[in-house]
Image (cartoon, helix red, strand yellow):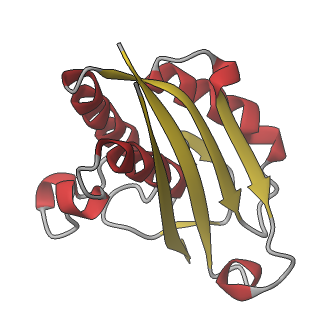
Amino acid sequence: MFRIGFGYDAHRLVEGRPLILGGVSIPFSKGLLGHSDADVLTHAVIDAIMGALAIGDIGRHFPDTDPAFKDMQSLRMLEQVLGWVWEAGYQVHNADSTIVAEKPKLAPYVPDIQARLSEILQVPVHHVSVKAKTSEGMGFCGREEGMEAFAVVSLVQK
């Protein structure tokens, strides 16, 4: 038995915030705005896992109205969600994701992001795909107003 989930997230780029993607700090003049650390990639992965479990989305379980989640590391949220995966009798099999951003160039950081996510997801690094794309100057990502991420995660029974 297996389950598949899809996740999406977007955050606005602002000055004065660190840029965190997949739990990795990326040197850049702007960061993502959000109640937590606004790690758009990890949020998309979380939503994909929650979709596979059919338990709602990140906003339902980690609302931005709850001060307990203020500035929380998204990887801590992901660890909690993985606990729900295991309680349901599943484990992550693989994750595929895409980050959309004009700047900074993310290719040099992709191996570190894959390694960090594979560590948290407890899967081999070759089971975690992270791709970085631009939107060729179109839309809010193209205007460098924000970033978005998409993720698909498969779960298998333990």
Q: Residue 64 location, x and y as percent?
A: 22, 67
Residue 21 shows in the view: no
In the rendered structure, the answer to whether residue 62 lies left or right of residue 125 reads: left
How many discs mark residues in the rendered view?
0
- Where 125 falls versus 130 (above or below)? above
- Where 1 falls versus 57 (above or below)? above
Q: Residue furthest front?
A: 1
Q: Residue 139 location, x and y as percent?
A: 71, 87
| Image quarter hosting the C terminus | top left
Residue 101 shows in the view: yes
What residue is at 23 percent from the left and 50 percent from the top? 55
What residue is at 13 percent from the left and 53 percent from the top? 68
Q: Viewer-proximal residue, 14 or 144?
A: 144
In the rendered structure, the answer to whether residue 25 lies left or right of residue 46 reads: right
In the rendered structure, the answer to whether residue 89 lies left or right of residue 128 reads: left
Q: Residue 17 location, x and y as percent?
A: 49, 64
Q: Residue furthest right?
A: 136
